[in-house]
Image (cartoon, rainbow, N blue to C red):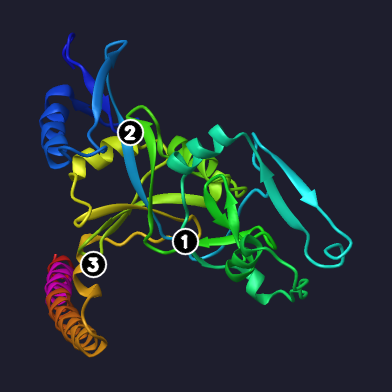
Amino acid sequence: MGEHQIYVKLSEEKLIPKSDILSLLRTYNCYHEGKNFQLRTREEEGELILEGLLNIYWGLCRPIRLQMFDDNERFCLNRSPTEFNNNSQIRRTAPAGKLKHEEEDCPQLLRTRSDASFMRVQRRSNTHTAGDLQRLRTHRFSINGHFYNHKTSVFTPAFGSVTNVRVNSSMTTRHVLNLLLHKFRVENKCEEFVLYMVHESGERSRLRDDEHPLVTRVLYGPCEKISKIFIKEADLGEEVTYDVAQYIKFEIPVLDSFVEKLKEEEEREITKLTKKYSALKSMILHQLESKVLTSDRV
């Protein structure tokens, strides 16, 4: 390692020279020219730091739990005699300026389904404003920028929908996951999730806890048609090697024929090895017999 050489950390074991990263970064920023995804650089204590937005795709199979209340805003429960025995209406109160700012910058989760569909919901009063009727149709309202069903905290982001977080190259996979979960006020623990680099070929590789996702993104290139970073459940995700990925897209009959050919090849190899070692065994036994006869004559 050169005395004045600057490196970027990919993981605890692997460092990448500054010159290599800058070369890849020029391609990365050229691809995102005129967009918000261009990365900036700075040097800090002899280390090159990249920072910018990182796209992460939702690949969850199970619902996640969202916080009911916002950390910085107050919620009021307005109960009238006609509404008390029905579902109470939850209304958010905040200064107008703050609400306008949130509408511009708020993160959003695209919804697929909710366990509220399995719950028995009581009928509401017929006296509702236009806004109330709209809420009744959609059964959701916005908290922290995401659409939330106010009858349950269970929510499943649409598979393949994308969000982004602002990160830097010093953040590990765990840091990025914590940042993403905090952005959407997800109550699930960070340890329940992992990040995967999913390739167009079907190959999937897990980002280790000490890996730096932004650096990994730069190394794999900017085109997300070729590779994407997905968040998945830790107990459901599975790595797929490049060799296995080559067969994933084939139809079942084609895969069955591959299996048959592999079995035939295996049997041929077994027969070949059996003959080889049987011949060696015969030669060794013959030599042992010769030595025994020679010793008996002596």
**Residue 178 can be seen in this image:** no
Looking at the image, which residue is at 23% across and 67% down?
A: 245
Q: Is residue 147 magenta?
A: no
Q: Which residue is mark 2?
A: 11
Q: State the separation of the CA atoms marked 1 and 3.
A: 21 Å
- The single residue placed furthest to the right in the displayed view is 81
Q: Which residue is mark 3?
A: 245
Magenta segment's dominant SS is helix
At label 1, counting other C-alpha atoms closer than 10 Å, the crowd grade (few under 14, some 14-19, many 20 or more) is many
- Amino acid type at circle 2 is Ser
At label 3, counting other C-alpha atoms closer than 10 Å, the crowd grade (few under 14, some 14-19, many 20 or more) is some
- In which quarter of the view is residue 35 placed? top left
How far from the left and from the top, in percent, is residue 39?
A: 24, 31
- Amino acid type at circle 3 is Ala
Q: Which residue is mark 1?
A: 60
**Residue 31 can be seen in this image:** yes
Magenta span: 279-292
Looking at the image, which residue is at 26% across and 37% down?
A: 36
Looking at the image, which residue is at 24% across and 22% down?
A: 41
